[in-house]
Image (cartoon, rainbow, N blue to C red):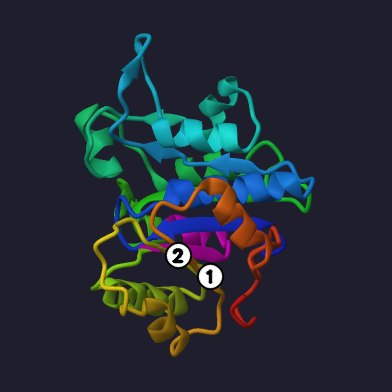
Amino acid sequence: MSEATRGLFVTGTDTGVGKTFVGCALLQHWRERGLAPQPRKPVESGCPEHAGALFPEDGAALTRAAGLPDMAMAQVTPWRFPDAIAPDQAAANQGVQLNLAQLVAACTGAGAGTDTRPLLVEGAGGFYSPLCADGLNADLATRLGLPVLLVAEDRLGTLNTCLLTLEALQRRGLQLAGIVLNRRRSDIDPRLDNHGALRKHTAAPIITAAEGISRAALVQKLSTSKLSGPTGATGTAPNA
């Protein structure tokens, strides 16, 4: 995919930090700007069975947030596996040899990645988590060449994983579009200031999402941040 391709790669510091929630808010925001965003979560594990077929819950949420019909889920999340483990292992358990070239092709088809049809790709797990037989989330992000939005749970200990991910992005020559600190628990010390600590290490936008924040409220935060453009090209902008 060329450098002119528009969109973002959404990754996390770990699994269960809110990537899909943030991705859905971005898709809704882009729609409100008159765009036709194209989401992709090319592989999803831990899919329950609905009506005799595996149902990708994250892929479905992204599909609907983008305003696409449910039939589009076949394109958004073409590979689905029942085991709630890393996608490479989940695929192997089903006798599927899933490779990086297949995931890249799934993300880049159907005209996605233009000024009016920005591409949003959500990985699985953390940036260095295995995604397929021959690649990590980091490898897919590198092949796509998209700016990376990092989602992290706003809690004690997240600075280490955030800074390790920022170093990994730099080593791979990938642009940091921004960081979303997603506070998912109410029992966090109110004096904890991950935002301020991370500001010392990056000029990219940092958005904080309070515990229990609604998607509409997060969309509003996105609309007033430097992350509002479909390119996510905000690596040198001040925080909004």
Q: Nearer the viewer, residue 51 or 196?
A: 196
Q: Nearer the viewer, residue 111 or 162?
A: 162
Q: Is residue 145 left or right of residue 125?
A: right
- Residue at 53% over, 41% down: 40
Quadrant containing the N terminus in the rendered view: bottom right
- Say if residue 117 shows up in the picture: no
**Residue 239: assigned label:** none
- Residue at 20% over, 31% down: 93
- Based on the displayed image, in which of its 4 quarters is residue 186 positioned? bottom left
Q: Position of residue 211 (x, y in %)?
A: 38, 57
In this view, which residue lies farthest toward the top? Answer: 51
Q: Position of residue 202 (x, y in %)?
A: 49, 84
Kind of element beneath mark 1: strand
Q: Is residue 181 above or below residue 89?
A: below
| Amino acid type assigned to the residue bearing label 2 in the image | Leu
Q: Nearer the viewer, residue 95 or 202?
A: 202
In this view, which residue lies farthest toward the bottom? Answer: 200
Kind of element beneath mark 2: strand
| Amino acid type assigned to the residue bearing label 1 in the image | Gly
Q: Is residue 130 left or right of residue 68?
A: left
Is residue 225 shown in magenta? no
Q: Looking at the image, how many numbered discs can be counted on the residues? A: 2
Q: Which residue is mark 2?
A: 150
Magenta highlight range: 139-152
Q: Are marks 1 and 2 in contact (CB under 8 Å)?
A: yes
Q: Which residue is mark 1?
A: 178
